[in-house]
Image: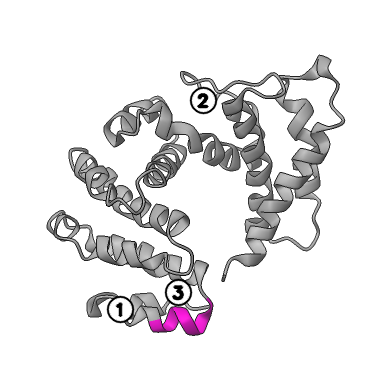
Amino acid sequence: MGDIRATCYHGSGHGIALAKAGDIPKSEWGEAAAFIDKPLDVCEALSKATSYETDECRQGVFNVLVDWMETKEYGFSYDDKRPFAICNTQPERRQFACYYEMSMKLDRVANFDPRNLAKVLNTISTARFRDTGFRVGIAGMVQHVVGAHGQDEIFAQCSELNDAYVGMCAQSIVSGLFEHGRPRAEYEAAYTFCNSKPVIDRGVEKLCWEEFSSRLYRFYQNDESRKLCNMVSEAYRTQCESYRK
């Protein structure tokens, strides 16, 4: 995997958060700061991490927190009406990681419908975080239908939204198919999707192949990803090669 180092930092965020949880007295359960502030400090003190890797570690911490919210552990619960309330209390450097991970549960909040997801996110004033929530929410929906061609229905629903959402939807479906697809063959369903008539007819083929190409280099080593680039439509093959590290 091209992203194995960053994945290691993300997993470290999980471990740091889980280790800290054992020290929190029951009187402080439900207080997010007691559970995440010190683990986030540790992430930010990792001297050999790049800024990207530091943020992966932060995301790992928030990932554990949002899972506790969803399963109602340590006195937490996920607030369907105000899912990002905790993110707004974080310093700016930690907000993206928080928004990203809190968005992981929006598939359920939106009843697995992209149209509902767009409505949920309309309450967010910052475009960057709104787009992040949509992308993560769509990728989350894909994990429930991967292997069953449910991505086609998701895209059909996305196609009722404005053009900006449709493009993000196509990219997020590809991301979800890679993240949740059959190991070592993650590209297959994404390849079929980018070649599909609805994607071409909706004019988001270029965006679809961009996401496909970038994901190849996340999931496969250079030699293998180079071969898979040859599968990409000729018009976008050079673009695929540009992602090589």
Q: Which residue is mark 1?
A: 231
One can see residue 88 in this view: no
The magenta span reads 221-227
Q: Nearer the viewer, mark 3 or mark 1?
A: 1
Q: Which residue is mark 2?
A: 83
Q: Residue 27 appears in which quarter of the rendering?
A: top right
Tags 3 and 1 in contact by the CB under 8 Å rule? Answer: no
Q: Residue at x 30, y 67 (%)?
A: 191
User: Alpha-carbon distance for marks 3 and 2?
Assistant: 34 Å
Q: Residue 38 appears in which quarter of the rendering?
A: top right
Give the structural element (helix, strand or loop) at label 3. Answer: loop
Q: Which mark is residue 243?
A: 3
- Left or right placement of residue 149 versus residue 196 in this view: right
Q: Residue at x 65, y 33 (%)?
A: 65
The magenta stretch spans residue 63: no
One can see residue 40 in this view: yes
The amino acid beneath tag 1 is Met
x and y percentages locating residue 219 in the rendered image = 51, 68
Q: Residue at x 53, y 20 (%)?
A: 79
On screen, residue 54 above or below 243: above
The amino acid beneath tag 2 is Pro
Sequence-first disc among 3 and 2? 2
**Near-viewer residue (41 or 31):** 31
Q: Residue at x 47, y 21 (%)?
A: 80
